[in-house]
Image (spheres, grey):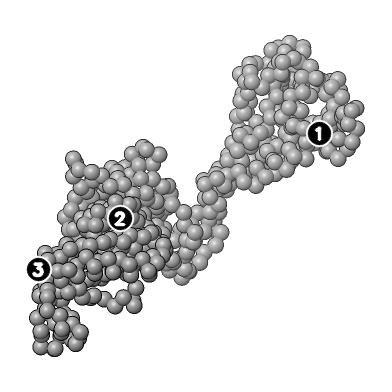
Amino acid sequence: MRDLGKMGESFFSLWSSSAGMVANPSQIDRDGWDFLVEFAGESDPDDILSGIHLSSFTCKVQIKSSDNQNRKLSIKLSNLHRLATTPMPAFLVFIEFDGKESAQRVFVRHVDHDLIRVILSRVHDEEQRQERHLLHKKRLTVSYDESHMLPAVSGKALADSMRHHIGADMAAYVASKIDYLGMVGFEDGHAVVEFSSQNTEDVTKLINMSLGLGDSVEIAELVTYKKRFGKKSALPHRNDHNVRLEMPHLEPTCQGLLRCRTDKLGPSHAFQVKMYSSPFNRSVPEHYRRTRLACDFFDLIFNPFDLSQPLTFATAPSAALHARQIEIRELSRLLEFLSLLSTAGQRTRVEFLVDTKVLMTFNMTSPGMCFPLKEELAAIECGIRVLDKLRIMIPVHISLDQAWHFATRLGEMDKILNTDVLSFKLDIPPSEQLAQLRREWACLHFLTTPVGNVWIGVFAIVIGKPLLNADGGFTVYSTKKELVKTVVRSDGEQIPREDLMTAIDEIDAEYNASYDVVLAFDPRDL
């Protein structure tokens, strides 16, 4: 009976010699390779110095010979493991004789990243079975096909194929393989962490922390197992008790657009949101599972596996949002919508989109809650009415901080501009000069307020007959109100005081013919 193994090794030695390679045979066939192949050093005659510092090509080769064309062979796992973990290049050379005296076809299978992954994953399977010491009794089937076949049965074709897989720099190949061996199998994490808690409250805190809603949580017991290729080690790496678990620098699972609609035929409101899906959702009972949709204005927390469970909706604008200026009417519509969502029993259709694709759709029924931005919304509505009354059409942007800070002034301006004239009553302090006046008074007011990024001033005349009051001063009940002049400036733009004084003189001259003009403010304050 002929020895196919010896035939294959002999032909390989012959081809190597013909291509200028040195095939050093393994003296003891238990290292996973048959030949240690050294390539002849080469240099570019036009650039003698280019290759002086480059390593010579060296690789390990295992030969497999057969008389059939099954294109697959079962190989000892221990041998494959050695080829996979050696830093130098490694090859499986399959030679088909078809029952003849000479090789008919030669296939070179590079032990590349894909094959290394398959081999090491299988080794970790055996390790899980605690049979790592039996790798020499385990086998793995390796396939090859036409893509691995040499174009000719020759030493040159063999050498060219190996050089192609190694590349131009042996040291770079070795460094790349070492890097890959260090990282392969860790793509989905390095460890498995198992923990236990004393009560359901701690489990809820843990879920909330994983959604970015808490800093830390105390765990009764924490057991860590090493993991590779998704396989947990049989024995724990460490076991800790009464530890505090943190998840700093938590990143969202994804980001997208949340589209809400309270009426099927009405307009929708869209919010840019971040989605946080708890990594513990697969490990805890279903009623604990939670996902969070968070934006600058609110948090929406729900169970994505059971949308019939009550959800949590909280209006909680961030500090950055409080200072951000938004177009005033857009902000008003947004706050009105959030106020509506805070109403108990309010039903809302919600869609979450990522890259224009709808990821989830559900109906939300508000549990009812306090709307914390009522004062800001009221102030913004006052600002809109002021802009409309004065027909100010320029773009106006306002922040929540500005609305809250200037709420009183916005309310006073709105009241004076939009309240019925007969409801005005003005109290004027005692004055000997004013006591000499006999005609109806034209009381000149100068009202000012910021509305977001613009500053508005209004000269208003309130006409009425003065009556002496109990304090010795005067009370004027208005019979007529006129808005004489409006001043509008962008935020930070200065108004010369002399321009305002000129405006006062012009108004005084206009009304003085029919009324006694009384200033209801101190011009020195301008």
Mark linked to residue 328:
2
- Residue placed under numbered mark 3 in the picture: 479
Position of residue 12 relative to residue 117, above or below, is above
Residue depicted at x 73% and y 11%: 100
User: In the image as oriented, which residue stretches furthest toward the top?
Assistant: 100
Task: Using the numbered discs, state the Cα–Cα distance from disc 2 to disc 3 in whole angstroms.
Answer: 33 Å
- The picture places residue 181, in percent across and down from the top left corner, at 66, 44
Instruction: Estimate the x, y position of residue 269 in percent, counting from the top left.
Output: 28, 47
Query: Which residue type does callout 2 highlight?
Result: Ile
For the residue carrying disc 3, how many other residues have a C-alpha within 10 Å: few (<14), some (14-19), or many (20+)? some
Q: CA distance from mark 1 to mark 2?
A: 71 Å
> What distance separates the C-alpha of mark 1 from that of mark 3?
104 Å
Image point (83%, 24%), residue name = 16
Residue at numbered disc 1: 57
Query: Mark 2–mark 3 contact, CB under 8 Å?
Result: no
- When the figure is inspected, residue 214 is found, relative to residue 108, above or below; the finding is below
Look at the numbered disc 2 and give the secondary structure of its residue: helix
- In this rendering, would 221 be left or right of 228? left
Mark closer to the chain start, 1 or 2: 1
Q: Which mark is first along the chain, 3 or 2?
A: 2
| Observer-nearest of 151 and 30 | 151
Horizontal arrangement in the rendering, residue 74 relative to residue 242 (left or right)? right
Q: Quadrant of the C terminus?
A: bottom left
Residue 220: x percent and y percent?
A: 43, 68
Q: Nearer the viewer, mark 1 or mark 3?
A: 3
